[in-house]
């Protein structure tokens, strides 16, 4: 049964409807919007606390600005649920992040109100500035452009590159800094401290109060005139010593900080700022999780809590009678500690994902040897490279899709100098409901082509541990990539003794006849499940776990090519440039003419859904692999009732 919104929200399908609500009723509207987000996310899942924190800001923006003619750009977009609900998507909001449903992030193809597709952080200022420059060029003088960026996302180099440009751009744009004092995990770094300082400093607060007192002296109900606004802006500038304010130093007019949950103040402020030209920044203070007490208290847990009972706050977890396999990231998080206890050169680095990557365990236990450096993947990689020059063994753990940001650093700062940085690429493959911005599809292809790199993928927990063990050995003198997917592996008893793996050596898992499956990483388990079913139909594929995309196990490939006329490769990366391509390159180099089918992520954007739905769509789940094998051996398809147990 569809979730019923409150009476005011029921009347609002578009920002035009919102504008019909009297200003003194907006706080009621905000309460209803917040409640609706709680109601829907508790039963359908998704990002939670961030959207609750910007309910008032979202409402005020659509109330004051003329969207979609005025352009609103959200950073990351995990906080844009209120925006989606207000902009014509309430009736589909219960499909959020589901297969064929709404995207969990703003997406140009989904709505005219989504001016820019997001998911990765810190792009909003650049994109908004691009739009503002285009508007100016086209003479669209009435068009306003607003970027909304969080304090965590503001720490990335990209945001600073954009502000550096915006400050001298002479464009009319507003940056809203949504400062809730946290990212997914507690924010780190000097910017965080700076923002705390300017928020709590008596000097700033006096300044702020003076400004608002001045505003309040204006005749009630009248918006300020351009000349007053201009004077005020000049006044504000004068009151601030520009050198003492980071943003003013970058030539952005700085306003705030203001209370981001006071809808009246937000509306008034935005109305005023609309009249002030030039590049400017409004510092808004909000509480992540606002309005849901548990989320306010434990903001990391409630960033994206999964399904929960909205009354008790109990997070709903599946229960099992038998021990379940751990998540790969937990195996990483616990294994790095085990290794670091024996090797004092080991360090762990994460760019802003200590909980997601499970490096948090090491950060708690060995705080001087495990660092969160904030949202700055490029810095994380070059920092690791610098540490490696001094003999440290750094496990730089970056989600596969976020590593795309640091490609040049991986090439220029690590590979060319042959520094033995260990890249643990978490969330490799299809991540599921975060969708295309977060799928880790490309890393096999983009790392495989770099000289000096070792590129590996474990098929299970024990393999992950062995690869981590091998990577940190003194004699391993190359950059070493270990990629593994989001979620559980396959081994409930995962704490196996660690042993060295010979670099570039795969494994023969099963002898067969006529056809062999060559898998890379976790999808090897799908292949194993397919083989179990195929056996019931009398088809006996061989199975190799390649383990390394670089260097390839040529001995093993010679064996497979000689023994099996037909080969199927399986990977959870792009078929273009991935391990299947590597096998074809090997075959071409050695004159093999085997029939080959490459299964993996096709050469198109794969949307969101559960991993299982997406594996199926891409044709490399167990059924897909079995079907491909059957087709290749030209057996009549025998439909079995076997279930695939992976
Ligand atoms: C390039 C990149 N790195 C990491 C992430 C993961 N991530 C998503 S939201 C987030 C925290 C963002 O903090 P902030 O901008 O303050 O937003 P808040 O959640 O507090 O609203 C992080 C680290 C990402 N989306 N993109
Ligand atoms: C918005 C964002 O980038 C993160 O919140 C991301 O969704 C986290 O993904 P995991 O749940 O896989 O850690
Ligand atoms: Mg934040």
Image: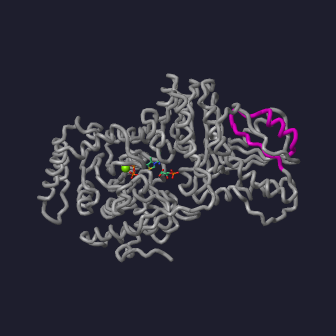
Stretch of the chain drawn in magenta: 541-565
Residue 57 visible (yes or no): yes
Residue 133 appears in the picture as rendered? no
367 over 180 or under it: above or below: above
What residue do we see at 28% from left, 38% from top? Answer: 246
Camera-nearest residue between 17 and 487:
487
Query: Is 583 on the left or on the right of 485, as rendered?
Result: right
Residue at (29% x, 47% y) in the render: 281
From the viewer's perspective, is residue 413 above or below residue 187?
above
Which of the 4 quarters of the picture holds residue 188?
Answer: top left
Image coordinates of residue 211 in percent, x first then y, are 16, 51
Let me know if residue 23 is in the magenta part. Answer: no
Eyeballing the image, is 302 above or below 410? below
Q: Nearer the viewer, residue 591 or 614?
A: 614
Q: Position of residue 103 (x, y in %)?
A: 52, 60
For the point 88% across and 57% down, which residue is it?
538
Q: Position of residue 177 (x, y in %)?
A: 33, 49
- The part of the image, by quadrant, that contains residue 8 is bottom left
């Amino acid at each position: 049964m569809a979730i019923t919104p409150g009476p005011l929200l029921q009347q609002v399908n578009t920002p035009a409807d919102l504008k019909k609500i009297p200003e003194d009723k907006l706080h009621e509207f905000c309460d209803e919007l917040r409640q609706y987000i709680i109601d829907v996310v508790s039963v359908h899942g998704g990002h939670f606390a961030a959207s609750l924190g910007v309910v008032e800001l979202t409402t005020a923006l659509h109330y004051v600005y003329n969207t979609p003619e005025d352009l609103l750009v959200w950073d990351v977009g995990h906080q844009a649920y209120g925006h989606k609900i207000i902009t014509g998507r309430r009736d589909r909001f219960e499909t959020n992040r589901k297969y064929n449903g709404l995207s969990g992030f703003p997406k140009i193809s989904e709505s005219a109100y989504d001016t820019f597709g997001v998911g990765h952080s810190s792009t909003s200022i650049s994109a908004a500035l691009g739009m503002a420059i285009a508007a100016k060029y086209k003479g669209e003088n009435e068009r306003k452009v607003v970027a909304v960026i969080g304090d965590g996302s503001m720490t990335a180099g990209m945001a600073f590159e954009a502000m550096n440009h915006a400050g001298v751009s002479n464009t009319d744009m507003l940056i809203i800094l949504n400062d809730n004092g946290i990212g997914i995990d507690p924010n780190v770094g000097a910017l965080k401290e700076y923002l705390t300082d300017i928020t709590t400093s008596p000097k700033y607060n006096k300044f702020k109060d003076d400004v608002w007192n001045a505003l309040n002296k204006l005749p009630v109900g009248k918006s300020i005139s351009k000349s007053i606004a201009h004077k005020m802006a000049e006044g504000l500038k004068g009151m601030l010593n520009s050198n003492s304010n980071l943003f003013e130093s970058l030539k952005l007019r700085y306003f705030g900080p203001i209370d981001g949950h006071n809808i009246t103040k937000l509306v008034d402020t935005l109305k005023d700022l609309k009249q002030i030209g030039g590049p400017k920044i409004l510092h808004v203070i909000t509480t992540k999780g606002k309005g849901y007490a548990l989320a306010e208290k434990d903001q990391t847990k409630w960033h994206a809590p999964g399904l929960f009972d909205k009354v008790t706050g109990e997070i709903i977890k599946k229960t099992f009678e038998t021990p379940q396999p751990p998540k790969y990231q937990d195996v990483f998080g616990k294994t790095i500690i085990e290794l670091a206890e024996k090797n004092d050169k080991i360090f762990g680095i994460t760019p802003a994902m200590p909980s997601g990557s499970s490096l948090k365990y090491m950060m708690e236990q060995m705080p001087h040897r495990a660092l969160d450096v904030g949202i700055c993947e490029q810095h994380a990689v070059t920092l690791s490279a610098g540490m490696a020059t001094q003999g440290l063994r750094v496990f730089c753990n970056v989600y596969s899709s976020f590593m795309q940001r640091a490609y040049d650093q991986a090439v220029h700062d690590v590979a060319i100098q042959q520094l033995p940085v260990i890249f643990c690429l978490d969330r490799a493959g299809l991540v599921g409901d975060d969708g295309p911005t977060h799928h880790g599809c490309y890393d096999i292809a983009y790392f495989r082509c770099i000289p000096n790199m070792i590129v590996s993928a474990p098929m299970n927990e024990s393999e992950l541990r062995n690869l981590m063990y091998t990577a940190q050995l003194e004699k391993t003198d190359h950059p070493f990539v270990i990629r593994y997917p989001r979620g559980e592996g396959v081994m409930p008893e995962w704490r196996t003794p660690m042993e060295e793996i010979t670099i570039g050596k795969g494994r023969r898992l099963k002898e067969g006849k006529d056809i062999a499956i060559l898998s890379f990483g976790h999808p090897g388990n799908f292949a194993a499940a397919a083989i179990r079913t195929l056996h019931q139909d009398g088809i006996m594929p061989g199975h190799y776990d390649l383990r390394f995309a670089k260097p390839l196990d040529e001995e093993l490939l010679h064996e497979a090519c000689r023994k099996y006329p037909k080969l199927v490769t399986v990977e959870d990366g792009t078929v273009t440039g991935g391990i299947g391509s590597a096998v074809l390159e090997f075959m071409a180099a050695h004159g093999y003419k085997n029939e080959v089918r490459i299964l993996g992520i096709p050469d198109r954007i794969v949307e969101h859904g559960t991993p299982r739905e997406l594996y199926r769509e891409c044709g490399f789940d167990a059924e897909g692999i079995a079907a491909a094998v059957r087709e290749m051996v030209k057996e009549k398809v025998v439909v079995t009732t076997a279930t695939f147990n992976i």
